[in-house]
Image (spheres, rainbow, N blue to C red):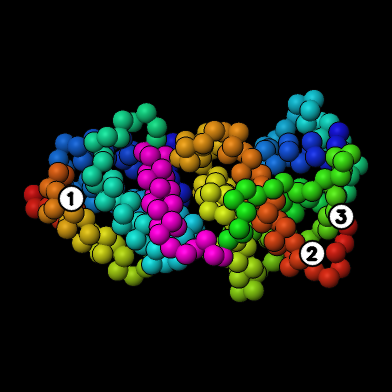
């Protein structure tokens, strides 16, 4: 098992519990190779950091502007009952 | 059922039922569809466009497209996948219209990390000091994360956000992007490695300690 093979596989299976013969080989490689072990750990941390980044919030007034844009679109085309349609 | 992002409400009326009501002329159903997805569409657009004005424009364009094209949605994929396809295309269009590429790596194709001829890592890999859970998401770290993802070429950023942040499957991401699953995996692998590399100087600190 080479680092390159481990890299290709661990990246495809970052979130999976893996237990095939191939994966056992990779686990053995990770145990013996500090660089690959550090690579996997820091790769997981990278993804984790982006997942925990604060989420942007819908700007104030964005919903109203969207409804207005759709109402304008509806007047142009009239193909569908939009959010401003009168029942 | 997987709803798009966290905005979905699996405990409420399904997307399919909502769409059926829209098609039947129910005036309130389209508003309900907007309320269900506007936050998620905006967030996705923001994460890709990295700009609040462009993100809002992409969100508006996306719902106008949904308004125009809902009759062509055949239900073979999940509604969320169809919606992601539309917003992805709108983000791509916005990207082409602007100079956003200036911040990105000039390489169209990111490369995998370097290996020796024997297939070993070409460089020593340092462990990072803290786990994400240990470290407060401070302003400095947020800026590093922002700068790094802004440098990622857009097609790679899209795959990374679709798959790793918003939680679409590889199959769904490939369908949304219009590429093969193999190409999706390759882009994801390189995007992750690129971001890891970008964060490394900040996260490893001066000590650059080994595992």
Q: Residue at x 51, y 40 (%)?
A: B173
SS state under label 3: loop
Residue tagged by mark 3?
Answer: B124
Percent across and percent down for residue A4 are 80, 40
In this view, B101 is above or below A77: below
Q: Label 2 marks which chain's residue?
A: B
Q: Is residue B83 magenta?
A: yes
Q: Nearer the viewer, mark 1 or mark 3?
A: 3
Query: How far apart are the two marked residues, 1 and 2, measured between alpha carbons?
Result: 52 Å
**What's the mark number on residue A82?**
1
Badge 1 vs badge 3, beta-carbon distance below 8 Å: no
Main SS class of the magenta portion in the image: helix
In this view, A45 is above or below B78: below
Start and end of the magenta stretch? B79-103
Image quarter of residue B136: bottom right
Q: Residue at x 33, y 51 (%)?
A: B62
Percent across and percent down for residue B195 are 66, 56
Residue A31 visible in the snapshot? no
- Name the image quarter holding the N terminus of chain A: top right
Q: Do the dots labelled 1 and 2 sit on one chain?
A: no
Q: Label 1 marks which chain's residue?
A: A
Residue tagged by mark 2?
Answer: B204
**In the displayed structure image, the side of residue A8 where residue B8 appears, left or right:** left
Badge 3 crowding class, 10 Å Cα cut-off, few under 14, some 14 to 19, many 20 or more, is some
**Residue toward you, B54 or B11:** B54
């Amino acid at each position: 098992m080479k680092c390159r093979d481990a890299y290709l596989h661990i990246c495809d299976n970052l979130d999976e519990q893996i237990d095939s013969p191939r994966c056992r080989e990779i686990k053995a490689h990770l145990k013996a190779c500090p660089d690959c072990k550090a690579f996997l750990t820091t790769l997981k941390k990278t993804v984790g950091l982006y997942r925990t980044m604060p989420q942007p919030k819908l700007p104030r007034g964005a919903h109203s502007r969207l409804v207005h844009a759709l109402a304008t679109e509806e007047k142009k085309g009239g193909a569908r009952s939009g959010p401003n349609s009168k029942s | 059922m997987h709803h798009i992002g966290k905005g979905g409400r699996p405990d409420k009326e399904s997307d399919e039922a909502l769409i059926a009501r829209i098609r039947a002329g129910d005036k309130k159903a389209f508003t309900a569809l907007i309320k269900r997805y506007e936050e998620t569409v905006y967030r996705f657009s923001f994460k890709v466009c990295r700009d609040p004005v462009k993100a809002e424009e992409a969100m508006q364009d996306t719902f106008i497209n949904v308004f125009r094209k809902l009759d062509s949605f055949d239900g073979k994929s999940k509604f969320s996948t169809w919606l992601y396809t539309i917003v992805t295309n709108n983000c791509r269009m916005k990207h082409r219209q602007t100079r956003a590429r200036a911040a990105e790596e000039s390489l169209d194709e990111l490369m995998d990390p370097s290996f020796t001829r024997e297939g070993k890592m070409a460089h020593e890999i340092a462990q990072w000091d803290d786990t994400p859970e240990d470290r407060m998401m401070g302003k400095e770290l947020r800026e590093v994360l922002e700068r790094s993802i802004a440098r990622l070429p857009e097609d790679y950023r899209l795959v990374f956000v679709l798959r790793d942040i918003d939680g679409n499957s590889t199959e769904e991401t490939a369908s949304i992007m219009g590429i093969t699953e193999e190409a999706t995996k390759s882009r994801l692998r390189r995007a992750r490695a690129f971001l890891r590399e970008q964060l490394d100087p900040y996260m490893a600190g001066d000590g650059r300690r080994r595992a």
